[in-house]
Image (spheres, grey):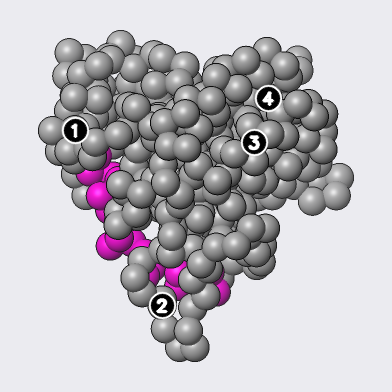
Amino acid sequence: MRGLLTDDVRVLLQEDLTTSLQTSVVLGAQRPVTGGCIHNALAVESSVGPFFVKWNRGRAGAAFGSEAHALDVLRRAALRDGLIAVPEVLASRDATGVEAGWLVLEYLPPSAPPSDYASRLGEGLARLHARGSELYGDLREREATVDVADPSPTRTGTSAAPPSGGVPHPPSFGWFEENRIGSLDQSNPWMESWASFWRDARLLPQLESAFREGGLESRDREWSDRLLDAVEPALAAVSGAEPALLHGDLWSGNVHAGPDGRPVLVDPATYLGHGEVDLAMARLFGGFDEETFRCYRDFLPGLEGFEAVRLALYQLYYLLVHVRLFGAGYLADTRRAADSVIRSVL
């Protein structure tokens, strides 16, 4: 059956789990579950209980390590309050050559959301975001253990390179390694300016790639250039914001009520950014109760201009990602969002 563990992967995965859990693990029955848009996604029974397993080969399976790192950071931060859950990483391996890669998590299957699910998600997300600044030093120190080079931004920006023997201050925006947004590469250079980060590390790479791949047409050049010029004035009101710990890809398919009713976050594209980014993605395709946003703002009040200006600017990143992944069906929404941002500030 398509997606199930092949014999070679099953043997290696058993060995990996036996090592990581320090007990003998024998894998049993397996069945496909939701979450298999990019990877094979399975619920797997074993001699020590059920697991959730994602696995793949080639380039698609070469980023499980960075996803595991993000889940680990999110889980540790979420444990402080217990309002939301993030599954524990039990084993991970990046695909190399012909060898498969995988990510094994504790299995937190969906359940019916309780009555306080939306409010828990709102406050829990706000508290998670608020951990960003306190985690900054630890995240910078983790770079020494990750064999990934940060690419330099392609437009002028203020990069926060660490001084010899210490962590740079003030806290910057970025992450300690590259990761993925869907199946696309997502670079995360450390930058002190939020506007520079959003322009140079988010919008500009997607625009350039969309033009190169043919997703955007020549007539889109004018608005794309004007859009990049609009980023700094559009984000002026939040220029002094502290970095927030983001999920990074918060659409409704990446959060569900777990077995105990708590919201469970999965499939992150995590970095330190501005909390409004997660709110913007959550609003882009729907599926979230308004109570979630109200409870978030009760804990972290917003600044004027989010709905009128910044919402569309943040959603543009995800719309450009969808143009590249899924084609012209997202072009009209992308152009409308860009026009909204440009008209609001230029």
User: Please, which residue is most extreme toward the bottom here?
Assistant: 164
Q: Nearer the viewer, residue 43 or 159?
A: 159
What type is the residue that disc 3 sits on? Ser
Residue matched to label 3 = 224
Quarter of the image for the N terminus: give it.
Answer: top right
Secondary element at image label 1: helix
Q: Per the image, is 138 magenta?
A: yes
What type is the residue that disc 1 sits on? Arg
CB within 8 Å, label 2 to label 4: no
Vertical relation: 18 (above or below) 168: above
Secondary element at image label 4: helix
User: Please, which residue is most extreme toward the right here?
Assistant: 98
Query: Which quadrant holds residue 261?
Result: top left
User: Please, which residue is most extreme toward the front here?
Assistant: 346
Residue matched to label 2 = 167
The earlier-in-sequence mark between 2 and 4 is 2
What type is the residue that disc 4 sits on? Val
What type is the residue that disc 2 sits on? Val
Secondary element at image label 2: loop
User: What's the distance in space between the residues labelled 4 and 3, CA to CA?
Assistant: 14 Å
On screen, residue 301 versus residue 31, left or right, reads left
